[in-house]
Image: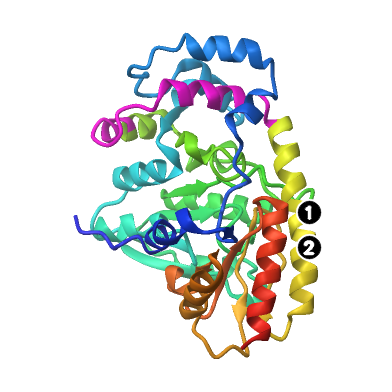
Amino acid sequence: MEIKTFAVERWMNTYENDAVYNLAETDAKPFTLDELLSLGDKDELIKELLKIKIGYNPTTGRQELREVISSFYRETKPENILITTGAIEADFLVTNVLVKPGDTVIVQFPAYQALYSTAEARGANVKYWKMDIDKGYEPDIDELKRLIDKNTKLIVLNIPHNPTGAVISEDQLKTILSWAEEGDFWVLCDEVYHDFVLYPNVIPPHGRSLSRKAISVGSMSKSYGLSGLRLGWIAGPEDIVNACWEWKDYTSISNSPINDFLATFALKNTDKVMERNLSIARENLEFFLKWLKEHEDYFDYVKPKAGVLMFPRLKNIALSSEKLCEELYERYKLLMVPGECFEMPGFLRIGFGNDCDMFKTGLSIFSQFLKSQ
C-alpha cells in the first residue's frame, strides 16, 4: 500500500516547534497539567495519578473511559467504543476495515488529508464533495447525491468542517444517513469539533446517535485542548468496532494508562473544559472578524459556524499562499498553513482557538506584512 506524503503534517512539523506566533493551530489552547487537574480536587487526583502502573492499558481502552464516551451517544454501550491513538488512528482503522479496491469513497473537500489519502491508498475511487467559498461554504447535498454510485461504500463527513468552519445541518445529515440506509453504505462522521459550539442550535447530533449506518469518531485534541494525550475513539456497531480492534493490534496496540486516566477526568468535566475553551475562541473570533473587515481588500472569507478554523481566499496579493506563509515565518516566526497543504492554492487556514494575546499579536504582525506588499 503506497500513500501520499501528508502535506499539512509535514508543514506543521517543519515550522511549528520554533514558531513564536502560531496562527496555524487547529486545537483549543492546550491545557497545562496543573490547569487541567485544578478543574477537580487536584491533591486527590495527583494521588491517583501516582498510583498508576505504567504498563500496558487494555487494548480497547479502560472500561470506565469507554463508559463515559458511550454515554455521549444514543443506544451505545462500551462495547460500541474503541479507544485509539487520536482521531487519526480511528479514521485510519475504519477506512482500512471498510474500503476495498474499486469501492467509491466520497469525501467532503477540502479535507484533512487522512480522511481521503488512506482510501486512495486502499485502491478506492475517491470523489470530492466540494465546499465552495463562492457559495458560502454551504454543503450542497444535491451535489452529494449526484456523486453517489452503485459502488459507493463510504461517505466521509467532517462535522464541523476542517478547514472551512462549515456545518452540515441536522436535516441534511439525516437525509444523507437515510441514503446510506437505503444504499447499504457507511457514513464516517469525524466529529472532533463537535463540542466547539460557537453559536446555539448549529451543530447536529452525533451521527452515531441518528443511524445504524453511521460511525462517529471523536478526539481529546480539537475541542478539548488536550492533543498531547493522543487519545481518540470510534463509536459504531460492535462488529465494525471489533474489526477495527483487529487492525489496532498491528498499529498502536493500546494507549497510555496515564492518558486514559486524564481523558476520563476531562470528559467527566466537559462543561468546565468547554467553558474555558469557548471563551477563548469567541474572544479571538470577534477580534478576527473585525480584523478581516479592516483588511477586506486582501481576503474573501466566510464566517465559521463552529470550530476554531477559517479558510479565507487571498486576493490582491502577488505572492502565492505558500510563499506568503514562508515569508511570514522567515521574517517574524509567524506560522500559518497555506492552501497548498489542502490542494487549494490561494487559500490560508487560520486557527483562532489559541492564546488570545498571542493571536492578536500575530494578526498585528500580519497587518504590517500586508501593508509592506
Q: Is residue 235 visible?
A: no
Q: Amino acid at mark 1?
A: Glu
Evaluate if marks 2 and 1 touch, with contact meaning CB atoms under 8 Å apart: yes
What residue sits right under mark 1 in the picture?
283
Highlighted range, magenta: 245-270
Most prominent secondary structure in the magenta stretch? helix
| Between 367 and 254, the one nearer to me in the picture | 367
> For this view, does 64 lie left or right of residue 56?
right
Given the image, on which type of amino acid does mark 2 rest? Phe
Q: Residue furthest left?
A: 1
Q: Quadrant of the C terminus?
A: bottom right
Q: How far from the left and from the top, in percent, is residue 21? A: 59, 60
Judged left or right of residue 148, residue 126 is left
Given the current orientation, which residue lies at the most extreme front position? 331
> Looking at this view, is 294 or 126 the one in front?
294
Residues at marks 2 and 1, CA–CA distance in whole angstroms: 6 Å
- On the image, the x and y values in percent for residue 115 come to 41, 55
* Residue 4 lies in the magenta stretch: no
In magenta stretch: residue 251: yes
- For residue 151, side relative to residue 176 (left or right): left
Q: Which mark is residue 287?
A: 2
Q: What is the tally of numbered marks visible in this picture?
A: 2
Q: Residue at x 57, y 14 (%)?
A: 46
Q: Secondary structure at mark 1?
A: helix
Residue at image x 77%, y 67%? 289
Write the residue at 40% across / 34% down.
84
**Residue 347 in view here:** yes
User: In the displayed structure, would residue 210 be above or below residue 295?
Assistant: above
